[in-house]
Image (cartoon, rainbow, N blue to C red):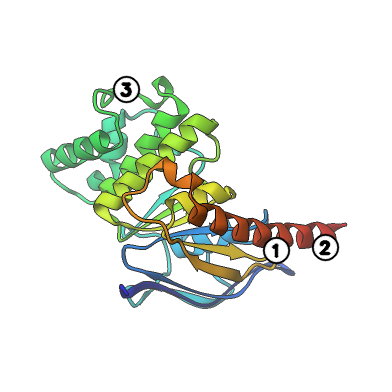
Amino acid sequence: MAASILQARGVERRFGSTLALQATDLDVAENDFVTILGPSGCGKSTLLRIVAGLDTPTAGEVLLDGRRITGPGADRGMVFQSYTLFPWLTVLDNVAFGLRERGLPRTEQVDTARSYIHKVGLKGFENHYPKQLSGGMQQRTALARALANRPRMLLMDEPFGALDHQTRELMQELLLGIWEAERTTVLFVTHDIDEAVFIGSRTMVMTARPGRIKLDRDVPLPHPRSYAVKTTPAFMALKAELTEAVREEVLKAQAATA
């Protein structure tokens, strides 16, 4: 088994008197692709933001390669549901942004950015601006920008949630293909159970607020993985287990607010 590069120990987050995330432990192994499911408001995104260094836990700590996370860093690439591109920069310069901030030579910025633009299927769009791109193309650009910085971990918060169904499935296949080739460690938050099983090597379910990890399952599906795997008995069995676990927590959340 690969060594764990991320450890969360007793991580808790309160917002005033509201406990959003109860003491949570999490280990993510190197090269793992972990997907996280759970009802709305369960603390999935809060946990991800703490790992990203965009939020601070009320208690506990998160370690990456043994070092405590105290803020954002280039060792973690973040992709949000909104595309968060700079509208005044071209695709090329958006993707190269992190490399420029690190002070890399312009030729290296351009070569690296072009490589990742090609990997996400946007070759020929280097000089386009975000407003000239579809939603799917903008999210491909955001993904290329995160990957171009060669982060230790890629953190993704519902990155395909705003896309139409067909584009979302194509983006899942694209991301999975890139992961199979590069094996960047990924922590991916989603509400979509099919998505969580299809792209993940491991998937978790969080409880209703205050959230904690309720279920942790390896995904027993081979690689390379194509959309055809969604009709296999192994896929359907895991989907059924996760659906029941998520449904139980959604009903608890509804009962708590009734």
Kind of element beneath mark 2: helix
The three-letter amino acid code for the residue at tag 1 is Ala
Kind of element beneath mark 3: loop
The earlier-in-sequence mark between 2 and 3 is: 3
Q: Which mark is residue 167?
A: none
Q: Residue furthest right?
A: 258
Q: Is residue 78 above or below residue 83?
A: below
The three-letter amino acid code for the residue at tag 2 is Ala
The earlier-in-sequence mark between 1 and 3 is: 3
Q: How many badges with numbers are in the image?
A: 3
Kind of element beneath mark 1: loop
Work out how far the residue at label 2 is from the one at label 3, CA to CA, in angstroms.
48 Å
Q: Is residue 232 above or below residue 111?
A: below
Is 224 displayed left or right of 204 in the figure?
left
Question: Which quarter of the picture shows residue 249?
Answer: bottom right
x and y percentages locating residue 106 in the rendered image: 14, 39
Residue drawn at (80%, 56%), measured in percent from left and top?
254
The C terminus: image quadrant: bottom right
Q: Which residue is mark 1?
A: 208
Is 55 displayed left or right of 154 in the figure?
right
Q: Is residue 101 above or below residue 26?
A: above
The residue closer to the viewer here, 62 or 158, is 158
Question: Which quarter of the picture shows residue 22?
Answer: bottom right
x and y percentages locating residue 102 in the rendered image: 23, 51
Q: Is residue 224 above or below residue 13?
A: above
For residue 85, say whether it is visible: no
Residue drawn at (22%, 38%), measured in percent from left and top?
113
Q: Which residue is mark 2?
A: 256
Work out how far the residue at label 1 is from the one at label 2, CA to CA, in angstroms.
9 Å
Q: Which residue is mark 3?
A: 128
